[in-house]
Image (spheres, rainbow, N blue to C red):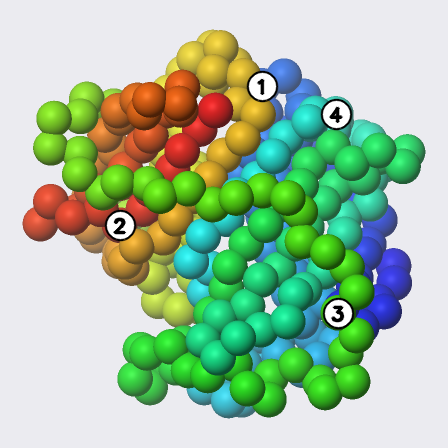
Amino acid sequence: MSDAGCRYSRDLIILPSMCNADSLLSIPAAFDMFQDTATLHADHFDIGPAGMHRRNYFWIISKTIMHISAMPSMMDHVEARTWIQPSDRAKCERDFSIVKDGESLLTVRSIWAVVSHETGRIVPMAGLYPDDIVFDEPAPEMDFSRIGKDFTDAETVGEYTIRAVDIDLGGHMNNVNYIRAMLGCFASDDIKAMNISDIEVQYITQSYEGETLTFRRRYDDNGGTVIGAIKKDGKAAFLARLI
């Protein structure tokens, strides 16, 4: 385990609870691993759970893109790495990778913001990072897409009613649980046939316990599968693009 300013890493074993039906790290578990590693790094700057609670703030992710070269197998020993980019006024970027035997298996870019518990609004990033951090780790070369929010004529692939186990400390559905609910609309064989190498997710609005989300699917002109989690009012809460 190490931390050096903008970078942080930890050694992990891919345990059975993290794996899918093929004994590989599952996509939701990879997102969990990313968020957990990010939290441990943030805690070094006193902007982890305790530090943010004291400020009456919490972190949110607005969008993430993950490239999968290969998923590690059950009981593999890997290194989880995360690093941050300089923040602007309202948001910051955090990146992530899983490395095995010196080879990067999985790479992530993500955009985060900080929200006030009191007002529910985004607060400025100024002062959250120490002044002496040296940002010397480049961002992965992965571009975010423009994902359209209109699913009027899209195919319905499933529904999901949000439960207590889906709720995080912000009082709304946890980011990774949207991904679990989305993939839960498909059979294991369907997911295997998708052979997902890239997954991009965008969080549009918060969802709460008791709400029912309808997952709808369409295809874009570039060979991507686009899925939206649609709320009762017809608006998208969550968007994903799979390749």
Name the element at disc 3. Answer: loop
Residue at the image point whose x is 62% and y is 60% from the top: 94
* Residue for badge 1: 21
Callout 1 amino acid? Ala
For marks 3 and 2, the one nearer the N-term is 3
Q: Quadrant of residue 95?
A: bottom right
Circle 1 packing at 10 Å, graded few (<14), some (14-19), many (20+), is few
Q: Amino acid at mark 3?
A: Phe
Q: Which residue is labeled 2 in the image?
A: 237
Looking at marks 3 and 1 on the same chain, the residue that comes earlier in the sequence is marked by: 1
Q: Position of residue 226 (x, y in %)?
A: 33, 30
Mark 2 or mark 4, earlier in chain: 4
Mark 3 or 4: in front is: 3
Quadrant including the N terminus = bottom right
Q: Which residue is mark 3?
A: 135
**What x and y, as percent, mark residue 105?**
74, 32
Spatial CA distance of label 4 from label 1 is 11 Å
**Front-lying residue, 20 or 241:** 241
Residue at far right of view? 101
Dot 4 or dot 1: first in sequence order is 1
Q: CA distance from mark 3 to mark 4?
A: 32 Å
Q: CA distance from mark 2 to mark 1?
A: 28 Å
What is the x, y in percent for residue 20?
59, 25
Q: Residue at x 16, y 48 (%)?
A: 235
Location of mark 4 (residue): 73
Q: Pointers 3 and 2 in contact (CB under 8 A)?
A: no
| Cα distance between the residues tagged 3 and 2 | 33 Å
Comes first in the chain, label 3 or label 4:
4
- Mark 1 residue element: loop
